[in-house]
């Protein structure tokens, strides 16, 4: 076999010729094919060193072609390219033995660098995995493709993963992808929101309890850790976990053992731990609010999700994804795809609520007008009056020679004032759980009862 021979497969003539030209200039011997059938005709034992193939071909898929390549030419490395990236295709490609996963459009220099790296490496052993019926995370921006590759890389490994990102970026979806493409996809996926459970109940919900261990414990309760045995334990809002419980979590992370409240002996519970937070846990460690040893145990591998404002090129594909979902869910019949004017309007929005906010806007637009092409409806959903509280004109400007604690206290009080004391709405604006607001208020000395500040209860009653 001639050294450094590459097979390029793509049904896009311009892209195929561009890749072939770039690789030929680098000194590689390049063969090309425009269909899966044509490529199969070129694949033979020791026929080439590397195959670069699109995933979506006119008469088949790159994944099917990949399996054929592994059977006939097992020594060849494979790079998969696609203009329609999803976390499933990245994870599936890696499990099938793909060396690399590259999203279109890409720079020629990037392709050449990946080809060089592939030719210096060996091919991982392939194994079959089926794609799900609907993608969990989609997009083709380089920042989200890096997330795909990170999920594909770490999912099979038995180590904890910390997922960081703003509210609404899809942290739980990444956790579920890690589970599905992990070593035990048939095991349970147990999610526990550490910020949504009262502190006095959190230990029992996390570690379980024995019957009679405290008032109201009328039966044995396994807790989330035991329920996740041979599966994945997802700890959402891990930054809200009280320090006392962080110590007990550390024991589980170190030894795999858990002891229920009131139990005499610990039990071994094998499970994968994935944690998520919208906080900077390193800063929380420095501030003394999060244990350093727990942080390093949880963050054996970190995945950082980009905000939607940093991947605006994915908005059209996300809108189309949600259009199809809610067209079927709401039984709307055929709904026309969003036009350029609507998409440009959406691209200009800052998206503080990220992908979750975009999904809400698409759903509301379909409910309100049955269409995604009524620009006025879309714009009205993006206005502050549609769901965000604008600052009152007399809201004080926070600044001056104040400590961080004083600034935080003044900011929370200002938000509560803007919301007329509605704690639920204030927590939404602050981007934290209501339970977290209570904890911050207690720590900062903010009285939330109506007699002290006139703040309303969760139902908005004064």
Image (cartoon, rainbow, N blue to C red):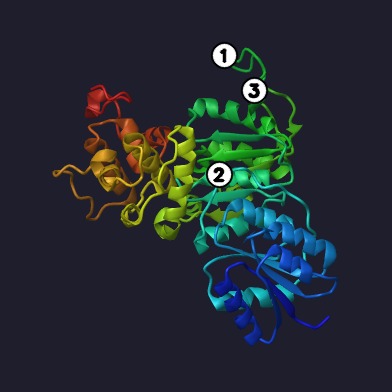
**Mark 3: secondary structure:** loop
Which residue is rendered at x = 39% and y = 56% of the image? Answer: 309
Q: Which residue is mark 3?
A: 209
The part of the image, by quadrant, that contains residue 260 is top right
Compare marks 2 and 3 and give the one earlier in the sequence: 2
Give SS at disc 2: helix
Q: Are marks 1 and 3 in contact (CB under 8 Å)?
A: no
173 sits left or right of 186 in the view: left
Above or below residue 91? Residue 74 is below
Which of discs 1 and 2 lies nearer the camera? The answer is 2
Q: Which secondary structure lies at badge 1?
A: loop
Residue 297 coordinates in the image, percent (x, y):
63, 49
Residue 140, percent across and down? 52, 59
Considering depth in this image, is 453 or 367 the residue closer to the camera?
A: 367
Residue labelled with disc 1: 215
Q: Which mark is residue 173?
A: 2
Is the residue 12 above or below the residue 312 in the image?
A: below
- Quadrant containing the N terminus in the rendered view: bottom right
Alpha carbons under labels 1 and 3: distance apart: 11 Å
- Tell me if I can see residue 445 in this picture: no
Going 14% across and 43% down the picture, which residue do you hit?
394
Which quadrant of the figure contains the C terminus? top left
Front of the two marks 2 and 3: 2
Whether the residues at callouts 2 and 3 have beta carbons within 8 Å, the answer is no
Crowding at dot 2, Cα within 10 Å, few <14 / some 14-19 / many 20+, comes out as: some
Q: Tell which circle, 1 or 2, labels the residue nearer the N-terminal end.
A: 2
Residue 346 - label: none
Q: Position of residue 168 (x, y in %)?
A: 44, 45
Q: Left or right? Give the position of 158 relative to 285.
A: right
């Amino acid at each position: 076999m001639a050294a450094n021979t590459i097979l390029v497969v793509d049904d896009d003539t311009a892209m195929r010729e561009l890749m072939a030209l770039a690789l030929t200039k680098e000194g590689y011997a390049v063969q090309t094919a425009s269909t899966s059938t044509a490529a199969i005709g070129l694949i033979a034992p020791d026929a080439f060193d590397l195959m670069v193939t699109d995933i979506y071909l006119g008469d088949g898929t790159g994944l099917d072609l990949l399996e054929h390549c592994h059977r006939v030419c097992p020594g060849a490395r494979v790079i998969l390219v696609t203009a329609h990236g999803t976390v499933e295709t990245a994870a599936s490609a890696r499990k099938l033995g793909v060396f690399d996963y590259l999203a279109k459009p890409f720079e020629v220099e990037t392709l050449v660098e990946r080809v060089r790296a592939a030719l210096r490496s060996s091919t991982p052993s392939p194994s079959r995995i089926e794609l799900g019926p609907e993608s969990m995370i989609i997009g083709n921006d380089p920042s989200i493709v890096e997330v795909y590759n990170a999920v594909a890389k770490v999912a099979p490994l038995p180590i904890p993963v910390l997922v960081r990102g703003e509210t609404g970026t899809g942290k739980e979806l990444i956790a579920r992808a890690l589970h599905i493409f992990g070593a035990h996809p048939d095991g349970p996926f147990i999610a526990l929101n550490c910020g949504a459970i009262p502190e006095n109940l959190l230990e029992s919900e996390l570690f379980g309890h024995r019957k009679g261990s405290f008032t109201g414990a009328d039966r044995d309760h396994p807790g989330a850790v035991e329920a996740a045995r041979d599966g994945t334990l997802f700890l959402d809002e891990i930054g809200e976990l009280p320090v006392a419980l962080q110590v007990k979590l550390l024991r589980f992370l170190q030894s795999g053992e858990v002891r229920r409240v009131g139990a005499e002996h610990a039990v071994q519970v094998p499970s994968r731990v994935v944690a998520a937070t919208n906080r900077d846990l390193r800063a929380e460690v420095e501030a003394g609010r999060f244990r350093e040893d727990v942080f390093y145990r949880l963050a054996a591998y970190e995945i950082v999700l980009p905000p939607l404002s940093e991947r605006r090129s994915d908005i059209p594909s996300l809108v189309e994804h949600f259009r199809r979902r809610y067209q079927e869910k709401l039984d709307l019949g055929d709904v026309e795809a969003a036009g350029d004017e609507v998409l440009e309007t959406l691209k200009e929005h800052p998206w503080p609520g990220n992908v979750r906010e975009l999904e809400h806007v698409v759903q509301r637009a379909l409910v309100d007008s049955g269409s995604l092409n009524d620009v006025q409806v879309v714009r009205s959903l993006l206005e502050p009056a549609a769901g965000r509280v604008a600052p009152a004109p007399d809201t004080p400007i926070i600044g001056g020679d104040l400590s961080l604690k004083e600034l935080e206290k003044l900011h929370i009080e200002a938000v509560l004032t803007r919301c007329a004391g509605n704690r639920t709405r204030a927590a939404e604006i602050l981007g934290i759980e209501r339970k977290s607001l209570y904890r911050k208020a207690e720590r900062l000395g903010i009285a939330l009862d109506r007699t002290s500040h006139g703040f309303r209860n969760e139902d908005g009653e004064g």
